[in-house]
Image: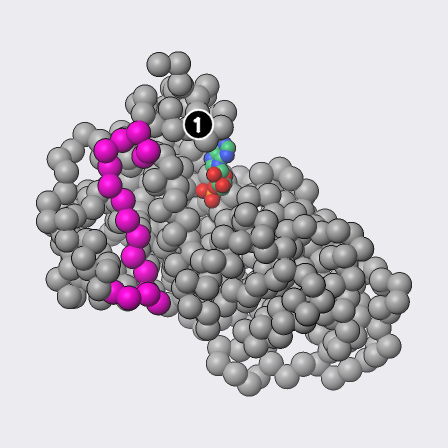
Amino acid sequence: MESSAPGFDSLGLSQPLLKALCEKGYISPSPIQSQAIPAVIAGRDVMAAAQTGTGKTAGFTLPMLERLTHGARPGRAQIRALVLTPTRELAAQVLDSVRDYSRHLSITSDVVFGGVKINPQIQRLQKGVDVLVATPGRLLDLFQQGALRFDRVEFLVLDEADRMLDMGFIHDIRRVISRLPDRRQTLMFSATFSPPIRKLATGLLDHPVQIQVAPANQTVRSVDQVVHPCDMARKTDLLTHLIRSSDLKQVLVFSRTKHGANRVVERLCQQGLLASAIHGNKSQGARTRALQGFKDGSVRVLVATDIAARGIDIQQLPHVVNLDLPNVPEDYVHRIGRTGRAGETGHAISLVAAEETLLLKAIERLTGESLRRENVPGFEPSILNAPPLDLSGGRGRRRPGQSPKGSSRRRQDSRSTRTYRR
Ligand code: AMP
């Protein structure tokens, strides 16, 4: 079989996996893959600092599949490898990768997450599954209902562990871990090795191989950032103008609120632009459809809130627009990290009204950079001074610069910031 992907064949992967890689068009392993794959195949625990866009999913999936091919099939309700992710979207994407890479293996895989009916999941799990990708809450529900067993778990992967901590999953994660067999391999992926991540790793990982891919993200370095000052009331019109005048094709728009996201989608659709919203009030089906449409090009503009956008991997996303600046300056860094993947230059546009001056300053303070301002002819702001937005109301809102309670966000993101200043 002349199917080996050059560069991957020295890492210890067998022919069915090399064939799948070749079919995906991967030529050579990314740095995280070259380091993680041999370590995992050798049976080591791994603790890796790597963000989305570095190839981390293949970094843990490929060697895990390699090892799973050698063991016995799972029995009733049993699982052999458990991958925990913070969001439903990321869980679905990881499952897609697992299925892609295992297409020439007789390995079964599935995904479970909340927001959809639990009974079909219970049914599917009955016959056991080799690789189960899950969000922590639903996994525990299923476990408590006796729908699955952890006695055969050989692998535990924590993907985007820092986000899981940020999102308050620590107790669920610890509950899951306490039920797993001691003899297993554990792989932990996180954007950074922040102190809370190190604390979680203690006792969980056994003499892990530590991998840090630096710079964390090529991407962020090649993001062209611009601020277009404008009046609050004209933002949607300016957005439409930018999309039409520059013929932007695949635009991810960030809105601070779910309500705002719905409103802008309505306006864009009225103006003949195909747009869809993705946020926590949407059903899982609606979110999946919106994301799929965005990926296949039938949806031109995807409007997302910060939480919903986490973990979404859309390859080579060319444009990110901040319709509102985020309340938390660190979110700006996450938002613009969505563009310019895999060496492509991305374009991050922020529409900033006078009311958001403080938010903009907080972002510039955090990144140590002054963002380029460019007026768009016809959309110059008429209001130059305005009281800052009141961000105090509403659940979970924070003032600019204020760190989320009990989280390590400020610490961990100072690293991403350094990255994109380079
Ligand atoms: P990840 O960091 O796992 O989210 O992967 C980012 C993107 O890079 C995904 O769309 C992968 O399909 C792609 N990818 C991963 N590894 C490689 C590779 N070795 N060569 C080319 N593309 C890759």
- Secondary structure predominantly adopted by residues drawn in magenta: loop
Quarter occupied by the N terminus: top left
| Left or right: 340 as drawn, with respect to 20 | right
**Residue 399 location (% of width, % of height):** 59, 77
Q: Quadrant of residue 229?
A: bottom right
| Left or right: 372 as drawn, with respect to 164 | right
Residue at 62%, 68% in the rendered image: 265
**Residue 299 location (% of width, % of height):** 59, 56
Quarter occupied by the C terminus: top right
Residue 9 higher or lower than 193, as above or below: above
What element does badge 1 sit on? helix
Q: Residues within 10 Å of mark 1 (few under 14, many from 20)?
A: some
Looking at the image, can residue 164 be seen?
A: yes
Tag 1: residue type? Glu
Residue at 15%, 66% in the rendered image: 145
Q: Quadrant of residue 134?
A: bottom left
Q: Which residue is mark 1?
A: 23
**Residue 342 location (% of width, % of height):** 58, 38
